[in-house]
Image (cartoon, grey):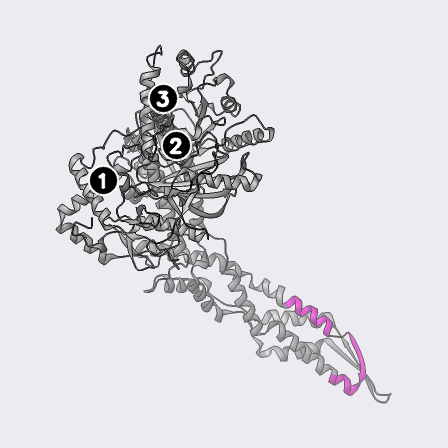
Amino acid sequence: FRDMNVLNDFLCPLSHELMQDPVVIEDGMSYERVLIEEWFKSHSTSPLTNLPLANKTLTPNITLRNSIQDFIAKNQSIAEEMRRLQALRRRLIEPGTRLSDVPAEYMCAVSWTVMQNPVTAEDGHNYESIFIQDWIASYQSRGEPVVSPTVFLPVEEPGKPPVRAPMGVILKPNPDLRQEIHNFLQQTLHRVGATTPLQQPAQSIAELNHIFTGLDELDGLLQELLQGWEPPRVVTIGTENSGKSTLLERLCMLPLFPHDIRICTRMAIRVSIRRSPIQWPAELEVWDTSSPARPTQIGDRRIIALDVDVRSVMDEIIREQNKVVEGVCCTRELRVTVRSPVLPPMTLLDLPGIVESPVDVAKQTRELVQKYVSDREGLSMFLVVLPATTSPRTSKAISLVHRYGVQDRSIGVITKCDRLEAHEYVLLEEYLANKDTEGAVALEPHGYVATMNKPPCPAGESDHIRLVRQAANELQWFQEKYEPHAVSVDPETVSTKALAAKISREYTAFIVQTWIPRTVRRLFYEMSSCHELINQLGLPASPGNLRGEARDNLVREAKACAMALLDPCCKSMMDDFVRHSLRPLEADLRATIPKCESRSIYECNHRMRIITAQVKTLVREHCSSAVLQSRWDSRIAAVLSGNGMHFRLQRFPKYVRALGEALRPHAPRLSDGILDRKIDEIFMTHVKRKHDLDTLPAMGTLEMDVPGIISSILFLVAELFVFDIDVAATVQCTAHTVFAGPQQEQECSHADRTTLQDRLCQFCNAIRSLLQLVAKNDDLVMCDGSHTSLLPVMYDLIQKVLPWEDATPPGTRVLVKSLGILGTVRASTDTLTLVVHDGPECSARDHAPSDLVVVKKEDVDVATNITTEASIAHVMASVLITSWRAA
């Protein structure tokens, strides 16, 4: 686009296309938001400099966005030309598209795309600038010498994977090639248009049902909401050298799986295909799966270009574990991630082939099959691969599938049909008939598909051209070799094209009927947990700006909560005083006051004054205003903190402080103005003095009525205890000041509540989107060619997800309890009527679809019949959204 008078600042450095939502990152450059977010999923560096970034903050570049929008408004013709070129570029990277008209030097060997900003590397080849820089950086980050993506050293020993040649890191821009590519695209665009394919593409998984696109749009959301989420996957099971890797390579039209006859798959290879706005180079990671519940990544990611990279890493791991490149590895998994705008989101698993010897390896291969069959049970489909020269009756793979009970989710794939002689084609027909015979075993309900993916042998041909030619050769072989000798040929059972179509139908049905209900149910439970967390924050919510009835309700609830806590506390203050003051005082008095003492008369009087003073001190220590004030403050603080009531008083610290300050002056106290005099009188009353003047010195005896003294003092202190407070008036005044005043307090949990409500909204949107996917795929075509409506599936899905109180047959009235919403549902296979009782009308009016009526109990006779699949999808979402708004 640089030749269209478009300012360079308007183009994203990653895609070289006009930005729609530019954001600035720490390196000071602007990028398209979705692309830099995709980059940050696996990088912590700048895309332009490859230098580490301190953070991944994205700042919207509003000024640049406005400038781009102004440019588009003033240059509609240029904008349209750019859109057409973008569409053409996407057509050129569709798997299986014949690229014979596209010169090989225009294609980047790292990303498999037509270059937009080519640079020349030191190996003499041209690459897309951003991707070759990433390739170099991935080697440098691991401390390994940089090697060429395309140049290999001579192979010294047959059977060993080729070794890449060393390469320097200097890159030179190639403006001449960039202009040449641009001219080629312009000519191609004017010749065939942006939407017409250059030539008919070979059918692959890219032709799968459009439901995959819808699922991919939820990928990021589900990854965030449901930890560990991954799309449904396809797993291959077969014997060694049965053609599993070749089949997967042909299905996805990507040269990633080892398929040399001398090199078999020695460990599980997981290829995760995810959709992305642009094509990215494939990435390879090694994971330790010895603990299936907690797999861990080993080492750094690698940028890869071809299957030789997968093969090389696999051999390294096998050699490290087994000392030689033999056997299999059960505790490691190679994970390849492919991000593309034209491939469907799915996961492909290539398992090591089943062998019979040696015994230990045979056991390992079977254990691996069992491990991946049982892992994520019910969320996988299986391709059971067997060579055409092997009878299904004797196939170890077919036997294991039946043993583990997954035949209902399995498709049999007969490979290497070119190895059959003409007189053996009758056996192939027998296998494809999917019946139990002497040599065949039925695989119900999906049966078998025959394939022939013998690689062509032209020298110097790229892998992508090879795969396209391979697909064409397969169709030609079945037409010229097999069909003339076959009694009857069902086009639905021959060729990888037919297999891709079968996978499309069965996978779509699997997603709609099995995977989506399970995912929605899990989302529903996550949503219920979210509701519980919101309720635990306290109700009603207070964002700090409530008015009218909502504010009055908040004041009322705040008063009720405070009164419920403080009223029992105040009423029990005398009991608290007895427990914490009088009882300890009684014990100390018993230890202080003696029953009888004999001393000189002078000492008796002095001793009497000391005992009286000690008693007065004890009374003040236990019952002074300072002590009672401190105890009152602590008691109020304890009462107002950590309560389990639904209001959650502690989310309003200002209100709690205001209550404490308002209550503090009303602490209990002793009216001690007469305390000393009264204690003196008690001792005068309860102490008997005796004297003996006949002795020298004159002696005296103090006989004290200890129980009487203690009882009188305790009664005196209790009589002087003062606690007088109007709790209701204090609480009401405080609540009005804090919540009804000009500066209403906002709950301190407001941010947490907002986050949870946003998360709850995401759950609702995810459920709605998943159900709408079901609605969009009505009139599903099954594997036998029959058509089926998904309306019963929708009804069954709602039954599975919502907790039905009465599981009566369709056509009867049942009650639904969903997150606090009580509703009446009348359902059948073609009609569903919903009425929600006690649901707020505003929620229904704001968030329910127009064909759904949500009414209050007094209007229960008003209801609307819902007869379309989309409406039923809305029913589910509306019930959930209504309940959220109600909470």
Residue in the picture at 45% in, 51% down = 144
Quadrant for residue 515, please give it.
top left
Q: Position of residue 252 (x, y in %)?
A: 36, 33
The residue under label 1 is 87
Mark found first going from the N terminus, 2 or 1: 1
The residue under label 2 is 249
Magenta span: helix, strand or loop, mainly? helix
Q: Which mark is residue 783?
A: 3
Mark found first going from the N terminus, 3 or 1: 1
Q: Secondary structure at mark 1?
A: helix
Q: Identify the amino acid type marked 2.
A: Glu
Residue in the picture at 52% in, 27% down = 354
Q: Please provide the residue range marked out in magenta.
A: 582-606
Q: Nearer the viewer, residue 560 or 259?
A: 259
Q: Identify the amino acid type marked 3.
A: Cys
Quadrant for residue 44, please give it.
bottom left
Q: Is residue 879 above or below residue 202?
A: below
Badge 1: how crowded within 10 Å, few (<14), some, or many (20+)?
some
Q: Position of residue 710 (x, y in %)?
A: 69, 71
